């Protein structure tokens, strides 16, 4: 393609954005990829396994990172926000604000800075299930494999312990933010999603009842590189749970919270039931649902899990969760198949919390049409701007990849014939 | 690139604990002696700006163009050590030694020395890859003129591609053209739309880049990406078209409703499918086919033939939205009518939930979950639907004037290869049975990757999906087809090694025509000539190196990866008379990074094991076992991805074939009275870093029990 | 295949429930959050999830004889938590209205009470009756001047006659309705019918009344706990005013028969009966004020209620306010305002009595009946 001087900006380095960036770059475009966190990979990096194949997400990420490493046409920026977009299709002028990492490229990921760092911060990669140091590596497979310092909690110049400990001169506590200007022909929006704050669902006990966790926390609990080294444990006492409830539509399909369906939660909970049973074949998984939504060939996965002996599915939404004696959790629902209320106690309750598009809170610095729920309405995008993945509607990884690939062709078309 | 004069240099990094773990003098000594490379330099921090300057200056000053860099994992500092025009070999002393071994231990030293020796051995055999650009044909063939095919054709044409669109029917439009209205695709998901397919047809017909062939079928697809000769039969006449890549958008057909007799189909004219209801609605009124009278009560039965082990074991993904839409038809055309929907699970994922909510708000649309046990047809022709397990808590009987069966979709590929590839491995896409006949990808993170390079499926032939999804899918497939042509022309591999300029370069004089490679190639890239001698259709090749592992004559090689390179590495190790030595061949994409992760977590790995990363375990050639055993090595591990129906190997068959070869080998070993347990396959996923120490220790212990390799003395 | 229930869906009934304040009923997707968050819904066949489906499906026959709609005390928890905005609390209210309408004779009156457009007609009845009686006793346009005495406008005997007749009518309609309702309840073979306990009608009734005195069930609605208090105040006000009515009737009739010395009304402020009357009125007004306020405050989350609900609230407010104002205006000796106010008072009281079987007032009777039935089934 004759577009050597034309670039594509991809905002968001999660699965959709990575895919769009790579597919475009491998089709001859120059791509600038911008990510707000310190690493690429987005939400999928936090997942233990993908449904329905139960394979580790880092495997595909490894390939994608390798593609980036080997592709001179992709430039990526982490810790970066897009602050201004002007111009139009074919000639957008974009201002990027690169926030300081406080650790430069000399970092070799030796962990010395973290070893001496006196300050803890909640590990947001693990959804607050444990702490990490203010000088930290987001996670073991992070790309780039480079530490970062959380200046919100760092003691700064007064401490300097990490600076002294680093043998590689990698720490710059006075690193300043940078402004970068890029000119691009088209823009792909791939800001992804945040997990709905389950504490806002006041009848489901999240944040009040110790052994109620979110589905994303469950991913971290089950992940070998998670806070419990892959052992699913209940937060109150570290016991391995024998009896776990999965509460579907915790916030989703709910006007008081998220009126739409979050697409992934049914498959995710079924998948997490397999985590539990793989850890302890004697354990019992109970899934409370309204509709099991396993579209297409996912139905096969549903059958596979449903037919396992220790899996029970109850049609009825859990609407009350409370603390029971012995760190247990009481769950109440109506089993609509029998028409009777079910009151049961569990060791651990997993809330299938839903997806919130990042644009619900982080609006883009350009005129874009949003739905009432904060999604981007693709019918209201300027020419040359394309939205992908969960910014448009909740979806799963497979569909994000599909969508990211499709967005790449649109973005390329914007460059062609100009 | 053949280098005119090769000058070798070894550069050792002392940082990241390497100098603390091993004695550099020892490394230098073996490099000189065993590695036969006298030019050795070391630096405190090789990846630092000073270190890199030192490295580059030294290489330039000394004319070194083949550099062994003994430092960290090549996964970490990748850009830094990329020196144009130079051959670079990375020796991972940080992760494999400094971070996983006891410092300054004799075994640690031996391990590091072996890795350096292996690096020296490797670089001597490797070459800089150069691509082989080819002249190709850039037209894209789109098979299927439904909404997916039309969209794919338009997307590809918008990139300037010429497109040949083949439709088997006389008219374009496919199933979409049979719709009265379409489920909403945009927020707020309330208003039914005019079927989008009609405007697409107009656009396609008006597009000069798109050649439309109706009443046409693909008779044969011969050749390879960029160079296909596709025979298309149009109205009985065959023509050959020069094609670069193929988009398979053959769509799906409605499930055969005659198999749904238990739901009354065929027993009453008033039991119709959802497809038939579209036609009824298009007449403007919902009338009973039996007597032409208005249908007051219409019952929709969801999952008619879908999610049913006796029929289709999958969910057809569009039917819930469609029945909601059709319930709206019923109500709009007759405000006094009632539309019942009996569903198993109401599946309106994502924002389609808004459509569900909007539609059910109509007082005349009545929904319940339930299992329909039968449809009764009375003598007077009246219908009744019986359902149990309903939300009403009882078995119910719904009287109906019209019963609509929400029938699902069967992919075109279920019983027809459609694309009719002239490949030795068969005319259709492989693995279809794994996906219930759909032309799907096995890879969650790479949706368009199948085992037929240059052929990209999209729409309902790929997965059950609705038309909105099919259109997005079409765009993705169009991009992949375009990209494939781009890479093929440049002589670069396509996904996943989309940077790779190497290609298999067999030394055909020694080929025995055993055809193992032709059978095992996951991508069907190896054909046979009239005499039965294999030859490569290189544009189909994905550079997985399975052929290299398959070949008993060891004649298939890549510039930077060959049987000889790996064999030389094995032979380069120093095997002492006492103590155990084990070599582990590991997949560089999964087990390899898992070892790096174990190192990052500072886990101890057994010092007896030497890891050799390979491109894919498919490349695992049994001669390496012979090399290892004859060298006196006591045990061999191979670590690859999960295989089976849910395989994780990104080259589809690599680890499965490696395991297969290993099993064969074990039989041979047993026959030779060599304990077969010495060589074992292990499934190691990229996330299994935590399991590695025990897995390795157990194997070492087992080998220790078996005793030393009897060949050790020789 | 004989065990299946033939579903009769009445689209018009669905629409009627929607008119009665259940307009959101179609939004329900049967998740049963409502059944769970309801503190008083039993574990065995809880409500209102199943009622929501019956409403959506227009299953009129099942709905009107479903006792569970009366077990609900309209706290609004279900509405607050409903993920679909289907407002089950409101829908159940609409069902209760449909139930009252179904069992009260003649149905036409019930339909009229349900709809705002008929309010003028309904109001015309007491206005005309009272005017007619005034004409009959000769006080119409002919009230003597001087100290205001409401018996000058409407002699006590006439008041008694009118209200006895109105109350008698109401009682007749109630008895008729309850008889049919009771029969239907017992004939009902709903799949949710629970096991019968061994309680007799009498012991069940006594238990229901006991619960009622302390508003036991009402207080279990945690969200709207304060509503129990306001409702209790209102009920106590009604009871006090009932006592006052009985008391003054006793004075009136006992003195007529010479059993006690005659006491002329209005009674002096020193009389205990007056205190009870004032306290009763105060309780009633304060109770209804609280209810009004709570309704307004909670309108967004747990439902505002329909016309049917508000009609009763306004009638009670009217009865109370006009009563108090009649008293005040009499003391202030403002005859030109006092007599018309008393007229309005009489009209509102008549309205309250006469239409009791058709207004929300009827809940007193049907709820009690349903609760007794539920008690007998051991359904709590």
Image: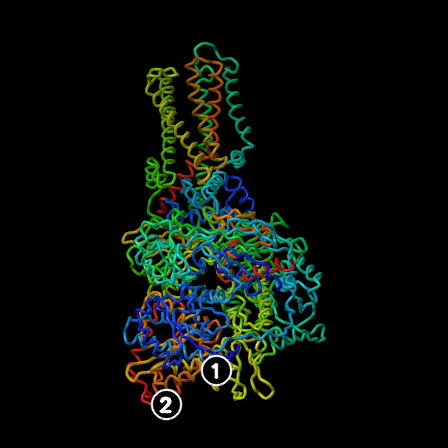
Residue identifier under label 1: B550
In the image, what residue occupies the spot 61% across and 47% down?
A: B335
Q: What colour scheme governs how the chains and residues are painted in the rendered image of this protein?
A: rainbow
Residue B117, position as x, y percentages in the image:
38, 78
Give the image quarter of residue B569.
bottom left
Left or right, A336 with reference to A4:
left
Q: Is residue C159 above or below residue A25?
A: above
User: Helix, strand or loop at disc 2?
Assistant: loop
Question: Counting other residues with Cα less than 10 Å from the Cα at mark 1, is it few (<14), some (14-19), or many (20 or more)?
Answer: many
- The residue where tag 2 is placed is B672
Q: Who is closer to the viewer here, B492 or C276?
A: B492
Q: Whole-percent x and y of residue B710?
A: 32, 88
Q: Is residue B66 left or right of residue A385?
A: left
Q: Chain of mark 2?
A: B
Nearer to us in this view, B35 or A324: B35
Residue C1 seen in this snapshot: no
Image coordinates of residue A367 in percent, x first then y, are: 56, 47
Mark linked to residue B685: none
Mark 2 on the same chain as mark 1: yes
Q: Chain of mark 1?
A: B
The x, y position of residue B492, in whole percent, is 55, 72
Alpha carbons under labels 2 and 1: distance apart: 22 Å
Vertical side of B440 occupied by A391: above or below: above
User: Is A19 situated above or below A122?
Assistant: below
Tag 2 near tag 1, CB within 8 Å: no
Query: In which quadrant of the rendered view does residue B670 lie?
Result: bottom left
Mark 2: give few (<14), some (14-19) or many (20+) Cα within 10 Å.
Answer: few
């Amino acid at each position: 393609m004759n577009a050597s001087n034309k670039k594509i900006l991809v905002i968001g380095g999660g699965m959709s954005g990575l895919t769009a960036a790579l597919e475009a770059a491998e089709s001859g475009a120059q791509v600038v990829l911008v990510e707000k966190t310190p690493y690429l990979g987005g939400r999928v990096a936090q997942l233990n396994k993908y449904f329905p194949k139960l394979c580790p997400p880092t495997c595909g990420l490894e390939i994608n990172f390798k593609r980036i490493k080997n592709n001179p046409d992709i430039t990526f920026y982490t810790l970066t926000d897009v602050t201004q977009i002007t111009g139009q299709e074919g000639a957008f002028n974009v201002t990027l604000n690169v926030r300081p990492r406080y650790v430069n490229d000399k970092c070799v990921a030796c962990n010395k800075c973290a070893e001496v760092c006196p300050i803890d911060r909640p590990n947001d990669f693990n959804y607050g299930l444990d702490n990490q140091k203010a000088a930290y590596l987001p996670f073991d497979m992070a790309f780039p494999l480079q530490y970062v310092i959380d200046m919100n909690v760092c003691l700064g110049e007064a401490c300097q312990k990490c600076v002294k400990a680093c043998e590689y001169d990698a720490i710059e506590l006075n690193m300043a933010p940078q402004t970068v200007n890029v000119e691009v022909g088209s823009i792909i929006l791939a800001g992804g999603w945040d997990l709905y704050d389950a504490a806002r669902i006041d009848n489901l006990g999240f944040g009040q009842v110790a052994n109620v966790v979110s589905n994303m926390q469950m991913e971290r609990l089950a992940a070998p590189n998670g806070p419990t080294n892959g052992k699913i444990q209940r937060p109150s006492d570290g016991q391995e749970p024998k009896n776990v409830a999965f509460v579907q539509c915790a916030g989703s399909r709910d006007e008081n919270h998220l009126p739409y369906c979050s697409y992934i939660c049914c498959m995710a909970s079924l998948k997490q039931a397999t985590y539990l049973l793989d850890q302890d074949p004697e354990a019992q998984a109970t899934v409370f649902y309204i509709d099991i939504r396993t579209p297409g060939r996912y139905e096969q996965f549903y059958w596979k899990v449903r037919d396992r002996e220790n899996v029970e599915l109850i049609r009825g939404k859990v609407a009350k969760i409370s603390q029971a004696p012995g760190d247990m959790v009481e769950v109440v629902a109506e089993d609509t198949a029998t028409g009777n209320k079910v009151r049961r106690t569990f060791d651990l309750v997993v809330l299938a919390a839903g997806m919130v598009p990042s644009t619900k809170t982080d609006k883009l610095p350009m005129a874009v049409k949003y739905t009432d729920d904060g999604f981007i309405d693709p019918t209201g995008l300027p020419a040359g701007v394309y939205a992908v993945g969960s910014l448009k509607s909740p979806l799963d990884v497979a569909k994000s990849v599909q969508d990211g690939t499709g967005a790449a062709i649109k973005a390329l078309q914007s460059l062609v014939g100009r | 690139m053949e280098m005119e004069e090769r000058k070798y240099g070894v550069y050792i990094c002392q940082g990241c604990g390497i100098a603390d773990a091993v004695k550099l003098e020892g490394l230098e000594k073996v490099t000189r002696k065993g590695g036969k490379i006298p030019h050795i330099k070391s630096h405190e921090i090789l990846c630092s700006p000073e270190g890199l300057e030192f490295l580059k200056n030294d290489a330039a000053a000394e004319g070194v163009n083949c550099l062994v860099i003994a430092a960290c994992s090549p996964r970490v500092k990748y850009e830094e050590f990329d020196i144009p025009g130079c051959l670079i070999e990375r020796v991972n002393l940080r992760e494999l030694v400094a971070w996983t071994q006891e410092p300054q231990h004799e075994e640690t030293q031996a391990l590091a020395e072996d890795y350096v020796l292996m690096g020296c051995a490797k670089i001597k055999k490797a070459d800089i890859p150069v691509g082989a650009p080819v002249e190709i044909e850039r037209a894209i063939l789109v098979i299927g003129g439904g909404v997916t095919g039309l969209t794919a054709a338009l997307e590809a044409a918008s990139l300037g591609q010429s497109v040949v669109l083949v439709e088997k029917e006389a008219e374009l439009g496919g199933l979409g053209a049979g719709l009265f209205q379409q489920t909403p695709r945009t927020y707020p998901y309330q208003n039914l739309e005019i079927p989008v397919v009609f405007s697409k047809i107009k656009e396609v017909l008006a597009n000069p880049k798109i050649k439309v062939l109706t009443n046409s079928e693909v008779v044969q697809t011969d050749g390879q990406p960029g160079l296909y000769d596709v025979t298309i039969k149009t109205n009985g006449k065959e023509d050959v078209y020069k094609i670069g890549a193929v988009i398979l958008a053959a769509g799906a057909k409605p499930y055969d409703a005659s198999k749904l007799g238990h739901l009354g189909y065929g027993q009453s004219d008033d039991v119709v499918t959802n497809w038939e209801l579209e036609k009824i609605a298009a007449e403007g009124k919902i009338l009973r086919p039996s007597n032409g009278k208005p249908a007051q009560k219409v019952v929709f039965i969801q999952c008619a033939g879908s999610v049913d082990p006796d029929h289709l074991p999958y969910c057809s993904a569009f039917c819930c939205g469609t029945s909601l839409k059709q319930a709206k038809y019923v109500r709009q055309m007759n405000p006094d009518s009632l539309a019942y929907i009996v569903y198993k699970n109401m599946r309106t994922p994502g924002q389609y939930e808004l459509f569900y909510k909007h539609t059910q708000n109509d007082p005349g649309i009545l929904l319940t979950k339930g299992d329909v046990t039968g449809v009764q047809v009375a003598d007077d022709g009246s219908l009744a639907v019986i359902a149990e397990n309903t939300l009403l808590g009882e078995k119910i009987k719904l009287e109906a004037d019209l019963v609509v069966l929400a029938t699902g979709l069967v992919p075109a590929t279920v019983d027809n290869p459609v694309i009719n590839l002239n490949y030795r491995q068969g005319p259709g896409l492989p693995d279809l049975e794994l996906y219930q006949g759909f032309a799907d990808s096995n890879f969650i993170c790479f949706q368009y990757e199948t085992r037929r390079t240059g052929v990209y499926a999209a729409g309902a032939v790929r997965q059950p999906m609705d038309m909105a999804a099919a259109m997005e899918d079409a765009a993705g497939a169009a991009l992949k087809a375009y990209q494939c042509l781009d890479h093929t022309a440049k002589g670069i591999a396509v996904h996943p090694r989309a940077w790779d300029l190497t290609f298999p370069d067999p030394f055909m004089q020694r080929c025995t025509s055993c055809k193992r490679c032709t059978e095992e190639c996951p991508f069907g890239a190896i054909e046979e000539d009239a005499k039965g001698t294999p030859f490569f259709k290189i544009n189909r090749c994905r550079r997985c190196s399975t052929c290299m592992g398959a070949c008993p004559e060891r004649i298939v090689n890549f510039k930077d990866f060959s049987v000889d390179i790996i064999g030389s590495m094995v032979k380069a190790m120093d095997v002492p008379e006492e103590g155990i030595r084990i070599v582990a061949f590991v997949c560089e994409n999964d087990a390899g990074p898992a070892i790096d992760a174990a190192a990052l977590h500072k886990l101890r790995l057994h010092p007896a094991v030497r890891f050799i990363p390979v491109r894919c375990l498919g490349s695992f050639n049994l001669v390496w076992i012979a090399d290892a055993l004859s060298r006196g090595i006591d045990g061999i591990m191979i670590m690859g991805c999960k295989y089976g129906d849910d395989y994780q190997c990104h080259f589809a068959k690599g680890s499965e074939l490696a395991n297969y070869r290993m099993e064969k080998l074990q039989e041979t070993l047993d026959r030779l009275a060599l304990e077969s347990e010495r060589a074992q396959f292990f499934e190691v996923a990229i996330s299994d870093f935590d399991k590695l120490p025990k897995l390795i220790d157990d194997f070492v212990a087992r080998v220790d029990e078996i005793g030393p390799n009897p060949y050790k003395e020789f | 295949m004989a065990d299946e229930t033939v579903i009769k869906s009445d689209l018009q009934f669905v629409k009627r429930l929607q008119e009665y304040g259940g307009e959101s009923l179609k939004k329900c997707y049967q998740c049963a959050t409502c059944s769970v968050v309801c503190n008083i819904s039993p574990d065995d066949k809880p409500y209102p999830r199943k009622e929501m489906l019956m409403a959506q499906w227009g299953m009129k026959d099942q709905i009107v004889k479903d006792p569970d709609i009366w077990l609900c005390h309209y706290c609004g928890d279900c509405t607050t938590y409903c993920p679909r905005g289907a407002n089950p609390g409101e829908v159940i209210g609409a069902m209760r209205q449909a139930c009252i309408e179904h069992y009260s004779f003649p149905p036409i009156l019930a339909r009229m009470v349900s709809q705002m457009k008929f309010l003028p007609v309904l109001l015309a009845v007491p206005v005309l009756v009272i005017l007619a009686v005034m004409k009959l006793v000769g006080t119409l346009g002919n009230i003597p001047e001087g100290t205001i005495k409401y018996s000058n406008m409407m002699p006590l005997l006439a008041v008694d006659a009118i209200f006895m007749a109105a109350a008698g009518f109401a009682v007749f309609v109630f008895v008729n309705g309850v008889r049919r309702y009771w029969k239907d309840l017992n004939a009902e073979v709903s799949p949710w019918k629970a096991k019968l306990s061994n309680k007799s009608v009498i012991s069940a009734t006594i238990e229901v009344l006991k619960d009622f005195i302390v508003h036991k069930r009402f207080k279990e609605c945690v969200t709207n706990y304060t509503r129990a208090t306001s409702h209790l105040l209102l009920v106590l006000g009604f009871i006090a005013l009932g006592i006052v009515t009985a008391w003054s009737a006793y004075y009136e009739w006992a003195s007529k028969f010479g059993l006690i010395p005659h006491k002329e009304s209005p009674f002096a402020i020193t009389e205990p009966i007056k205190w009870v009357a004032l306290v009763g009125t105060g309780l009633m007004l304060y109770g209804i004020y609280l209810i009004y306020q709570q309704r307004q405050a909670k309108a967004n989350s747990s439902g505002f209620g329909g016309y049917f609900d508000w009609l009763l609230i306004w009638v009670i407010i009217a009865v109370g306010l006009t009563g108090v104002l009649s008293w005040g205006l009499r003391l202030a000796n403002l005859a030109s305002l006092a007599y018309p106010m008393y007229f309005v008072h009489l009209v509102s009281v008549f309205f309250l009595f006469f239409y009791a079987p058709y207004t929300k007032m009827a809940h007193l009777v049907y709820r009690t009946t349903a609760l007794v039935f539920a008690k007998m089934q051991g359904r709590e």
